[in-house]
Amino acid sequence: MRVAMELTHELRDQNVTCDNFFASHMLDKALLKRNITLLGTMRKNKVDLPCLSRKEALHSSKFYFTRNTAVVSYIPKKNINVVLISTMHNSKEISNRVDKKPKMILDYNSTKVAVDTLDQLIATYTCRRKTIRLPVTVFYNVVDTTAYNAFELWIEINPNWNKNLLHKRRIFLEELGKLLVTPYIEGRKRLPRNEPAMAIVRNIQAADPAQGPSSSKQASKRARCKFCPSKCDNKTPVSCSNCGKHVCKVQVTYYCPECQN
């Protein structure tokens, strides 16, 4: 609630649409004091809600009203109900569509569906990891959103770029990631211990800058070890930085930096 109040502290005489993470009866009362209406989905376990049944008829709606607040429970599928709260609506208006959606849900979809769609698109290719730190969570979301915005701008400027590929966003993110990390890899003094990562770092550091990012693709491509019998079929992404032959960890001999020289 505090976050929503801070984000809307400069708004007056407008409507705010939010999802079930923020929406509550306490929030809608607080926003009404600023002449701001609220429209949002709600979790079914909120204590502010009346007893709601999922066993109503398909595409049916039940409305509940207080002086300034309206709640609707809509059944889009069998045994599933969607609950919305609104201080902007005060009637039981239902659309003429086949699914008989209430006007509250149509208004919610017209303003919030873009945010939900963006969340789904971001979740397809995300950098998020499990964390209990809120600043890190916000940072992950900023990176994901920024990467998607960059992709949209790139396609707008270059509409014919990989036009016939369905996974062009993945290709864009791969190239973007390589361009961002390559300067740091080139300036890295200590090699990682992981063999594939070590091979990639060495390959990039030894590559001609004019060759671009193709060297990292070659380093990550798996091939049969050139020194093991063919019947073993040992495949590895690691290749010799000198001759380029693929070599598995069975055939590798390790040297410390002093002995290597």
Image (cartoon, rainbow, N blue to C red):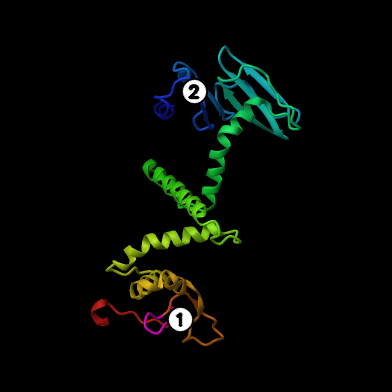
| Distance Cα–Cα, label 1 vs label 2 | 64 Å
Task: State left or right for residue 70 relative to residue 196.
Answer: right
Residue 199 makes an appearance in the image = no
* Residue 80 position within the rendered picture, expressed as x and y whole percent measured from the top left: 68, 34
* Residue 94 position within the rendered picture, expressed as x and y whole percent measured from the top left: 70, 24
Element marked by disc 2: loop
| Residue 176 found in image quarter | bottom left
| Residue 194 found in image quarter | bottom left
Q: Which residue type does callout 2 highlight?
A: Gln
Quarter of the image where the C terminus is located: bottom left
Q: Mark 2 highlights which residue?
A: 14
Q: Residue at x 57, y 30 (%)?
A: 43
Q: Residue at x 56, y 32 (%)?
A: 111
Magenta residues? 240-249
Query: For the residue carrying disc 1, how many other residues have a C-alpha within 10 Å: few (<14), some (14-19), or many (20+)?
Result: many
Disc 1 and disc 2 in contact, CB within 8 angstroms: no
Q: Mark 1 highlights which residue?
A: 246
Q: Which residue type does callout 1 highlight?
A: His
